[in-house]
Image: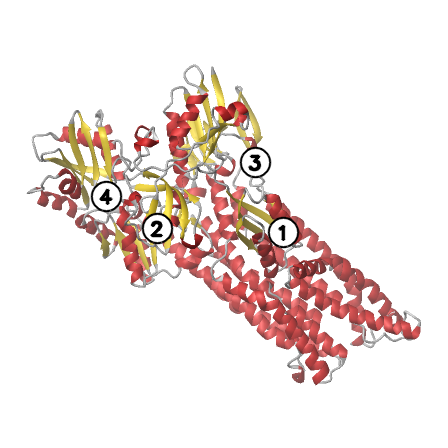
Amino acid sequence: MKKKLKLNIKGMHCRSCEVVTKEELAALPGVSDINVSFQKQLAVLTLDQSKNSLTEVIEAVKRAGYEALQEESVGTEANKSTAGAKVTRSSVPVKIESRVEAQGRVFLNDHGEPFFDGKISKFQKSEYQQSFGNGEVKNFMSKLSGSLDNAPLFNPLPSQDNVLSNKPDQIPAKKSQIPEISTPAETPDIRKRVSLSLSGMHCSSCAQLIERSLKKVDGVSSANVNFAAEKALVDFDSNQATVENLIKAVENSGYKASQIDQKDTEFETRKRQEETRMLFSKFISSLILSLPLLYFMLFDFFPGAIGKLFFNPYVGVLSFILSTPVQFVLGYGFYKGMWSALRMKTFNMDSLIAIGTSAAYFYSAFNYLSYFSLTGTLLGPVIEKIPELYFETSAFLITFVLLGKWLELRAKGKTSDAIKKLMGLQPKTARVIRNGNTVDIPLDQVVKGDILLVRPGEKIPVDGKIIRGSSSVDESMITGESIPVEKNSGDNVVGATINKMGSFEFEATRVGSETTLAQIIRLIEEAQGSKAPIQAFADRISAWFVPAVIIIAIGTFLVWYLIFGASLSFALMAFTAVIVIACPCALGLATPTALMVGTGKGAEHGILIKGGEPLEKICRITTIIFDKTGTLTNGKPIVTDIESYTETGEAQILEIAASLEKSSEHPLAEAIVGFAREKDMLMKNVENFKAIPGHGVTGTIKGETYYMGNRKLMTDVAKVELGQLHDKLIRLENMGKTAMLLADKNQILGAIAVADTVKETSREAIDQLKKRNIEVYMITGDNERTAQAIADQVGITNILAEVLPEDKANEVKKLQDKKQIVAMVGDGINDAPALAQADLGIAMGSGTDVAMETGGIVIVKNDLRDVVTAINLSHDTMSKIKQNMFFALFYNIVGIPVAARAFAFMGLVLKPELAGLAMALSSISVVTNSLTLKYFRPGKRNYLSLIAPLAMLILFSIIFGGFAKISSSMAFE
C-alpha cells in the first residue's frame, strides 16, 4: 500500500541541505517521488508501506542531520513520542583568530573541495550572528579577513574523517564517526524576511520615519524602506515579532502597509493603479474647486474682465467656500502626515505643505473674519474685492502638489516595468492531468508532483521534468539564446519558457515561489528595494533638510517683516513660498528610481544584480580575476590522449581511471567517465575512495590502491617519482591539455590528457575590459604551461597557475593589499572563498541552475561579454544617480533664495502656488531622467540618456524663469 507523506523538516538552510536530505530519503527502499524544499522546510514523498515505515523515513532525515515531523500529526502526543524527538545537526567547532566560533558540517562540493554548512555562534562585538548554508558561505568567509589557518574545514588535505562527502553512501550514519563532534541543542531557524507594500508616503522623510518605526519593533534586525518602490524589506526574529506587529508599527506612523502575496503577481499593479486613480480624482476635484479662484485672481490684471464688477463683492465668500474643502478635505492627507511626523518628533514633506498652505489659508481667513466683525457683512464693498485675501494661494498650492504627485506616481510606476514584464511571462492557467482527465486550473493551484500537458506554442507553466514526449523549447527569457533547445524525456524544463514544436507531459518539480522565474523576480525586487551606499549621502541631507527649511522660512519672514519693514502679507507669502518650494522628494527619488530601472534593465539582459552595493561597486573595479574552467572555457572538457608508460594497456588505464573518477563530480572527472561510457566500459567497484582537493582522488580496486591526479598527488601522496615522464607531460601541457596521471603504490602507470575549449566570446570580453584600463588575471589550479596556453588564446598576460582552491582567496587578498579594487568571476561554488574575499563576486550561472546565492552579480547566460555589459550599465546608472542628486540640490540651492525673495530688488519673486508647482516639477524631472536608462543597449551609446540632463536643465531653467516672471507681474506689497 502506497501513501503520500508530507514531512516538516527543521534546520535546512540551503540547496545543499535539500540535496543531502533527498539523497538520504532516496536511499530507502519503498520511497519514491521525493520533493524537498529548504525554503518551505518541507518534504513530500510516496511511501510503500509494504517495504518501509514512517519511522525509517524520519530516521533517514535524522541521519541527514535534521528534525522531521509528519505534517498531519504535528504537535500530537503520538508524534512527540516518535517523530518529534529533538535532533541536532552534527557540528564542527571552529575558532579563527579567537574572533569566530562556528558550528556546522563540512561537505565536499562538486569539485571535491570542502565547504561549510552551519552557523556562527559568536563573533567579536556580535557583529555577525546567524545560521547560513553553502550559498551564504561567502558572507562567512568575508568576515574571516583571509585568516583560515586554524579552520579544519579549509584544511588543504582534509582527512576522510573530518570531511563529509555529499554522496549518500559516504555520509556517516552515526555522529560518533566524526571526531571531536559537539552536539549542542539547535533551535529552528527563526529568522524571517518579509516584504511589505506601503502607501501614503510622500517623500524620503516618510520612508525614514517608517524605517525608524520598524526598527523599534522588538526582534527586527534590519528594515529597508524604498520610497520609490513603496516597499519595505524587513528581517526579524519570528519568536519576538510577527508580520502583524510590523504592519501595526507602520500604521502607528500614519501610513498603510500590507504583506505582499508572492502568489498574487498583479497585486502591485492593482495597488499602483488604484493609488493613481485616487490621486487623479483628488487632483480633478481640487482643480474644479480652484479654477473659479483663478478667474477671480485675473480681475486684478484685466480691468475689463467679464463679470468683474458683478463678482467682486462675492469673491471673498466664494473663495472661502471653495478653498475650505480643498484645504481640509483634499489636503487632509498632508495634515495627517504632518501629525504622524510630529508624533515621531520629526518633520517631512507633509509638514512643509501643511505649514505653507495653512499659513496662506489662516491668514486669509483671519483677514476675512476681521472684515466681517468690522462690517457685519460677508460681502465686499460694491464692485470691490475684500483686500488681503489669498485663499487662491492655498488652494492652488494643494492643486499643483496633487498634480505633481499624480505625474510622479505615474512615472515611478514605469521604473518597475522589468518586473511587470517578467510577471507577464507566466501563463494564467495550467493543463493538468488528474485521474486520467485533462483539466485547466489556475496556475497557483499546481502542486509538486502534478503531471502537466503542454502543447505546441504554449508557455510551460512551472519548472519540471519531462516524463513523456519531446519538443524544442524557446528558453530565451532565461538564457537569452534565441535558438530553441531540444528537450526529451528526463530533461528539465523551466516555467514561462515557450514550447515550440511537439507536445509533452512533465512532472512539476518546482511551483509557486520556488520556480526559476519566481526566484529571479524575487532577486530583482530585493535588489530594487535595497539601498546603494551613495544613498547614505541623500539620507543624511534629508534628515536635516526639512528642519533647516523651516528655520530658513521663519528667518525669511522675520527679516522681511521686522528688518526691512515689508507688509505682513509680503513677508507671509515669502515664508510660504520658501516652505513649499523646498522639498526632499527629488533628493529621495534620486537614487532609488535609477537603481530600480538599472537593476531591471540588467535582468532583461541576463544580468542579475543583487542590490545597490554591487551595482555601485562594479564600475569602480580596477582588477578582474577570471577562473579558468567553466568561466573562460566552456567547462566541458574532452579526453584527447591516453598514454601508457608500463605494460598496462590504454584500455585498462581508462577503465581504472574512470572507476576512480565515477565518484567525483569534477569536470575533468566527468570527461573521463563520459569517455569510458562511450566505449561501453564497465566501471569497477571502488573502496576507500577519497577526494583530495587540488590534487586528485585515490581508492582501492580489488585490493590494489590507485592514485589519479596531478604531479602533486604523485609526489606528495602516492610517493612515486616522475622521472623521465616530465618532458612528456610538458609536451601535452604546452598544447593546453591537462594531463592526469594514474599510479599504483609503486609506479606511474599512464596518463590521460583532457582539454577544454575556450568560449567564443572570451577573447572579445577580455579585449573590451583592457580598453577600460582594467587589469585582467586568470586563476587556475592547472600547471603553468596549460594555463599559459589557454591565456594566450584569450589574450590574458597575468596568470595565477597551480593555485589550490583554498589559496584563491589569498591571491585575491594579495591584489587588494596593492590597493586594487578586485572583482572575482567564477562558477559560484568552487570559487566561493575567492568570491567572498573579492570586493565584488560575479557568479556565472546557467539557465535553470542560477547561482543566486553566490556573488553580488549573477551572469545568467554564461557569456563573459555580460561582465562588460554589467560594468557599462553600472557606469550609466551611477551617472544617473549623480545627475539626479545634482538636479535636486541645484533646484533647492536656486529655488529657495528666489522663493525667499532675496532678488526682489531685481523684480524677481515667486508666488507660493507657482513655487509649489516648481517643487512638483523637480521630482518629475528626476524620475524622467532615471527612465532614460530604459533605452540602455549593450555595446551601444544611449544618446537619449546623454542628452536628457542638459535638455532638462535648460527646460527647467526656462520654466522656472517663466514662473518668476509671472510672479513678478503679480507681486504685491
Of badges 2 and 1, the one in the foreground is 1
Q: Amino acid at mark 4?
A: Gly
Question: Is residue 28 something that shows in the picture?
Answer: yes
Question: Residue under circle 3?
Answer: 428
Q: Which label's residue is closer to the chain start, 4 or 2?
A: 4
Mark 2 burial class by Cα count in 10 Å: few <14, some 14-19, many 20+: many
For the C terminus, the image quarter is bottom right
Q: Nearer the viewer, residue 529 or 837?
A: 837
Label 3: how many Cα within 10 Å (few below 14, some 14–19, many 20+): few
Residue to which mark 4 is pinned: 694
Residue indicated by mark 2: 835
In the image, what residue type sits under mark 2?
A: Leu
Tell me if residue 496 comes above or below residue 6 in the rendering. Answer: below
The secondary structure type at the circle numbered 2 is helix
- The local secondary structure at tag 3 comes to loop
For the residue carrying disc 4, how many other residues have a C-alpha within 10 Å: few (<14), some (14-19), or many (20+)?
A: many
In the image, taking residue 945 as reference, residue 91 lies left or right, namely left
Q: Which residue is mark 1?
A: 250
